């Protein structure tokens, strides 16, 4: 019952808020805050004990919901994210009030759909709610209706539809190969299947389908476009939760179905590593605050996927200890990244609502005098960079530990894994470098326009009460989750791997990895960012736009050729008729008369064609007459020849 | 009740339509003619429901030409599905047509043929052997030609002729199959599971006859290469494109192929033969090909017509799989696609009626003025793509599962084709919605234009009814699945 309230309540409340908003916008704003607050309380109530629920018979096979440590944690995190962004949105939308009713309708409905995914007990339920949130979140991207937003919206929709259908395919394959989609029965069913290659194919489809939402390479292209154009509270949700919905799906299928498929694990690992490195590089080059954060999200998703890949690899070779470490690392990193991006995107929202620009050169010096804002942003930055004592450090250390275990355990891949370890550390370094770049730009350097700097300095708070609660409150979680005691207990609660409680977070071995990463980051910042990306004291855009230039014409050309081909097929029948008219059944012009058909036929033909020049006048008519003739003859035969036998 | 009762729903609308010719309602006097037409159509639907409730399963022979070739009517499961589907749709769309055709000329003629088509379609549903089916099939072509050419301009005359050439030519091919199955089968009577040749594989000649029948009757289901008439025919008035070219006529093509495949030949006779493979490959090719054509089409209704071509081949694919799941998937898609496409066409028609525009680029911003119409359009588009919560998902899921379970290279190719076509489907339906609701700055075509608002309630109500059915069946499809499984088990 509680689960139904959590999942379906928001659907109802979304519609209520829409109706309320048509009457009174102020009341609607308080109503949605109340709804998200109530949702948070309900999900916390869920923690009291596991529950399962089921609605049989609807859709293709009924909906099932279930709870465990991981699901409950993410149900709570989802509610926290929504509550935080809703509080913050009250101030954010004070001036831009256009289409706000639509925005809230879809925000609240998506809350229900997201909780539906997080609490789903079988793959079909996950899929249903996943598709709902795919389409409802489309309106977040397009909310501001600028040309950029519409373009990003199309890309988002395109990827969402492809993802959804590939996922559909994957589900069908898995359901066919295993005979069930229930998470509880899947592992046994997959172990007993006679068609492992179909399970693998299903896995790849599902990986791409969910990966599209997670922002995994190569279906990441929507992410750097969509996050910057959405309103900041929505960006926080897109980045903090919707990407995690994708990860959730990948994780569920990896843990329940494909855990023994080594090659699948390696595929996830490779895609994860590419996403991780690519996102970090893109973020380093970007000179737009929200785009940097979006690319950073992509990179962090890469970290998590690397963890997923390591978990499958280690489990496939039978190292439960290594798999447990990787699993704890990736689950913690999911939680951490959600909360970090909540803080950082809301911080970016503060910038947007005050000055409506996002490029680094213009927002330079914005936060110099705003102490609370500075602290909140710094905590987020420290968390994501993996500085010891803050939350990102622990999860990244665990992920690193997982890779190191892998080098020892997976003999086949040990060389590849050694390379991956270094890419991992390097990407971690880049994370530190771009966060340092942002922090120094916004909070340390002065704006080149002194008047503007004065304007920036005149506002010492930057936020009103509700926003401060949301931003600072969420940033404090970085410190809380940075404590090994809290983090390891959370990890153990989420995945039931108790040994993680004895993990020595600050042993020299573990500190060393973090420190290598941080020093790489410092070096990159000093030698690359300061020397190359800053020219004459201003940040410059150096990332080549060439990729888009190559890819787009290629797509266009492909589509063009394809449509040309089908056009030929389309014309094949009519074309045949035309060809016949030019050759075999050609009309001859006889003394000014157009057609050689005499008498009745010609008259009837003209009657039907009504004077208009048809493509097929003769042929069509002849065909019709032939058919009628055949019918008449046949009827005559049938009626007269009674003695016919077969 | 004897099956003879079935004559009543078939003949009643035809007689009513003939009377409409003689009653001479002037073009200016809408209300009387509308009332008369609606009463005839509704009474016919009531007659259909009465016969579905009370008529016995035993078919009755009405007239015999010669031994074997006879006209006989009966009502079995598949006929129930088809008759039930159109009996719900016809009154609603007729109501919609009253408003849509307000300013057209020769309304008496239009509604007479429109009502007559109802009776003929019911005849197809009720026919219980190949000869009867064939007779009604030809009649259907003849009574719908005036509807396609109703506007009598160059385009619609051309469309009418093209339609006639393709479908009559197609029926000519089908005739071969009719004669062969009547002479060498069980007198062409429909028996679920087929009655040909005592159960073995069909002989070479009979296989060829099947191919003739598949393409011949498939011409009405717009199977490649006989698909050309359907997009051209979308110049017809919207009630015609919606009800006839998305449901009644095209589905009668699928219906006839189903009869031929499942009720005459049967799975055993065709399983694994080259004709089955041909049928599968042709339908898979058509469904992908038509989806691409839909994507490049700029005309709103013609785009939907291409999408119909694509979706009809989904059904043919399901039918030609020759498995029970395939049968269920195909017939289910017949029903669900009818509902979805009806709602899409009616929305397109409402848009065209209100704005007098007919191209996709003219949709920009229309959703702001006609939110309900385009909301239902979007729901229909999502459903057609196969998004869960809508009925299109259920039938696509069944088709994909059926394709996988058949587990031959051809059926797997079909599954891949289904997914690709579904993706293209999302592109060609949803881009319209995005244009309607979110025109990017400066492209809103109706900025400051007065008088562009929701259509009259006579148009909105049918749209809303189909939209709601779309969602309800999407969430709760168990009754339909059960009913179709019963048919597939030979119980109905």
Image: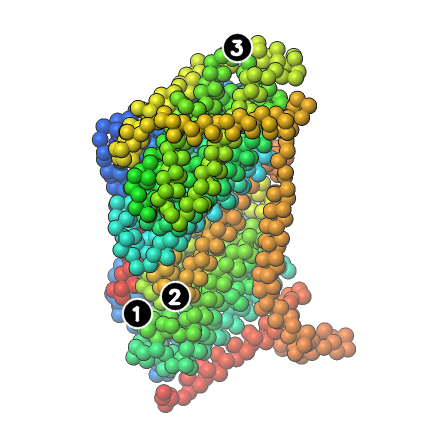
Q: The C terminus of chain A is located in which quarter?
A: bottom left
For disc 2, the marked residue is B408
How far separated are the C-alphas under marks 2 and 1? 24 Å
| Local SS, label 2 | loop
Give SS at disc 3: loop
Q: Which residue is mark 3?
A: A460
Using the image, tell me which numbered label, if any, was put on residue B192: 1
To the question of a shared chain for discs 2 and 1, the answer is yes
Whether residue A388 is visible here, answered yes or no, is yes
Q: Is residue B283 above or below residue A148?
A: below
Q: Considering the numbered disc 1 on the image, is that residue within a helix, a strand or a loop?
A: loop
Instruction: Decide if residue B131 is on the left or right side of residue B288.
Output: left
Residues under numbered marks 2 and 1 in contact, where contact means CB atoms less than 8 Å apart: no
Discs 1, 3 touching: Cβ within 8 Å: no
Output the chain of dot 3: A
* Colour theme: rainbow
């Amino acid at each position: 019952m509680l689960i139904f309230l959590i999942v379906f309540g928001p659907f109802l409340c979304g519609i209520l808020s829409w109706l309320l908003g048509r009457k009174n916008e102020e009341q609607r704003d308080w109503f949605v805050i109340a709804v998200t607050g109530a949702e948070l309380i309900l999900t916390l109530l869920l923690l009291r004990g596991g529950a399962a629920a089921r609605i049989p018979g609807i859709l293709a096979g009924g909906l099932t919901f279930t709870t465990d440590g991981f699901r409950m944690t993410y149900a709570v995190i989802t509610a926290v994210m929504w509550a935080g962004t809703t509080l913050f949105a009250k101030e954010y939308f004070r001036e831009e009030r256009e289409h706000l009713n639509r925005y809230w309708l879809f925000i609240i409905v998506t809350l229900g759909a997201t909780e539906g995914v997080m609490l789903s007990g079988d793959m079909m339920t996950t899929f249903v709610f996943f598709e709902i949130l795919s389409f409802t979140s489309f309106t977040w991207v397009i909310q501001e209706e600028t040309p950029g937003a519409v373009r990003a919206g199309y890309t988002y929709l395109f990827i969402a539809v492809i993802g959804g259908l590939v996922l559909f395919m994957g589900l069908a394959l898995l359901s066919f190969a295993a005979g069930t989609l229930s998470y509880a029965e899947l592992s046994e069913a997959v172990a007993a299947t006679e068609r492992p290659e179909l399970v693998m194919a299903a896995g790849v489809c599902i990986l791409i389908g969910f990966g599209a939402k997670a922002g995994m390479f190569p279906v990441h292209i929507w992410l750097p476009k969509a996050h910057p154009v959405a309103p900041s509270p929505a960006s926080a949700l897109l980045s903090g939760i919707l990407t995690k919905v994708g990860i959730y799906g990948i994780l569920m299928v990896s843990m329940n179905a494909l855990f023994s498929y080594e090659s699948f694990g390696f595929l996830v690992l490779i895609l994860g590593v590419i996403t991780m490195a690519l996102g970090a590089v893109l973020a380093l080059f970007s000179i737009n605050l929200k785009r940097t954060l979006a690319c950073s999200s992509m990179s962090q998703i890469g970290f998590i996927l690397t963890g997923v890949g390591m978990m499958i690899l280690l489990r496939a070779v039978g190292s439960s200890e290594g798999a447990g470490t990787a699993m704890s690392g990736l689950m913690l990193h999911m939680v951490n990244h959600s909360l970090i991006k909540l803080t950082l995107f809301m911080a970016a929202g503060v910038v947007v609502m005050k000055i409506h620009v996002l490029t680094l050169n213009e927002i330079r010096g914005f936060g110099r005098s705003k102490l609370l804002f500075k602290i909140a942003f710094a905590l987020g930055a420290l968390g994501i960079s993996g500085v010891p004592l803050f939350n990102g450090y622990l999860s990244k250390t665990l992920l690193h530990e997982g890779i190191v275990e892998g080098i020892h355990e997976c003999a086949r891949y040990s060389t590849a894994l050694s390379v991956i370890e270094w890419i991992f550390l390097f990407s971690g370094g880049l994370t530190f470098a771009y966060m340092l770049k942002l922090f120094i730009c916004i909070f340390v350097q002065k704006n080149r326009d002194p008047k503007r700097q004065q304007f920036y300095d005149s506002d010492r708070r930057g936020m009103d009460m509700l926003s401060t609660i949301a931003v600072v409150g969420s940033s404090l979680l970085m410190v809380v989750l940075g404590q090994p005691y809290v983090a390891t207990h959370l990890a153990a609660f989420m995945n039931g791997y108790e040994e993680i409680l004895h993990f020595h977070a600050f042993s020299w071995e573990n500190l060393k990895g973090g420190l290598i990463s941080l020093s790489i980051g410092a070096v990159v910042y000093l030698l690359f960012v300061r020397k190359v990306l800053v020219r004459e004291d201003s940040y410059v855009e150096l990332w080549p736009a060439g990729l888009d230039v190559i890819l787009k014409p290629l797509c266009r050309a492909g589509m063009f050729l394809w449509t040309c081909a089908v056009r030929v097929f389309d014309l094949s029948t009519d074309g045949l008729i035309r060809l016949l008219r030019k050759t075999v059944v050609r009309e001859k012009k006889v003394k000014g008369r157009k057609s050689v058909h005499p008498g009745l036929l010609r008259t009837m033909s003209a009657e039907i064609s009504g004077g208009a020049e048809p493509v097929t006048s003769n042929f069509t008519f002849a065909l019709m007459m032939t058919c009628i003739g055949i019918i008449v003859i046949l009827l005559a035969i049938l009626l007269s020849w009674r003695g016919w036998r077969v | 009740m004897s099956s003879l009762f079935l004559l009543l729903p078939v003949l009643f609308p035809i007689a009513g339509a003939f009377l409409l010719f003689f009653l001479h309602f002037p073009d200016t006097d809408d209300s009387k003619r509308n009332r008369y037409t609606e009463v005839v159509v509704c009474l016919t639907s009531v007659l259909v429901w009465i016969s579905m409730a009370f008529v016995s399963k035993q078919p009755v022979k009405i007239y015999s030409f010669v031994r074997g070739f006879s006209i006989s009517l009966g009502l079995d499961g598949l006929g129930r599905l088809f008759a039930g589907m159109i009996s719900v749709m016809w009154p609603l769309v007729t109501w919609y047509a009253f408003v849509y055709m307000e300013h057209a000329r020769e309304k008496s003629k239009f509604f007479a043929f429109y009502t007559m088509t109802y009776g003929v379609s019911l005849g197809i549903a009720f026919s219980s052997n190949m000869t009867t089916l064939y007779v009604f099939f030809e009649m259907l072509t003849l009574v719908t030609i005036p509807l396609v050419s109703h506007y009598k301009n160059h385009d619609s005359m051309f469309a009418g002729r093209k339609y006639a050439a393709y479908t009559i030519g197609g029926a000519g091919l089908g005739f071969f199959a009719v004669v062969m199955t009547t002479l060498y089968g069980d007198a062409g009577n429909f028996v679920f599971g087929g009655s040909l040749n005592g159960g073995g594989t069909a002989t070479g000649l009979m296989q060829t006859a099947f191919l003739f029948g598949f393409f011949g009757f498939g011409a009405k289901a717009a199977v490649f290469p006989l698909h050309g008439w359907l997009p051209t025919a979308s110049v017809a008035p919207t009630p015609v494109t919606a009800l006839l070219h998305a449901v009644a006529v095209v589905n009668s093509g699928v219906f006839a192929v189903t009869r031929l495949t499942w009720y005459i030949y049967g799975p055993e006779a065709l399983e694994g033969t080259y004709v089955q493979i041909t049928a599968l490959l042709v339908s898979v090719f058509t469904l992908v090909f038509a989806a691409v054509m839909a994507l490049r089409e700029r005309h709103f209704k013609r785009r939907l017509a291409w999408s119909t071509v694509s979706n009809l081949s989904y059904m043919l694919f399901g039918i030609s799989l020759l498995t029970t799941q395939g049968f269920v998937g195909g017939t289910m898609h017949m029903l669900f696609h009818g509902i979805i496409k009806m709602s899409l066409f009616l929305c397109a028609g409402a848009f065209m009626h209100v704005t007098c525009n007919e191209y996709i680029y003219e949709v920009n911003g229309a959703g702001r003025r006609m939110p309900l119409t385009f909301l239902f359009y979007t729901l229909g588009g999502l459903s057609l793509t196969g998004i869960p919560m809508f009925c299109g998902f259920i039938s696509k899921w069944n088709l994909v599962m059926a394709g996988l379970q058949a587990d031959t290279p051809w059926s797997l190719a079909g599954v891949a084709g289904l997914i690709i076509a579904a993706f293209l489907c999302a592109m060609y339906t949803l881009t319209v919605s995005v244009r309607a609701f979110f025109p990017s700055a400066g492209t809103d075509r109706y900025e400051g234009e007065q008088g562009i608002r929701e259509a009259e309630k006579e148009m909105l109500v049918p749209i809303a009814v189909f939209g709601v059915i779309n969602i309800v069946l999407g969430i709760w499809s168990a009754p339909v699945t059960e009913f179709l499984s019963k048919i597939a088990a030979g119980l109905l």
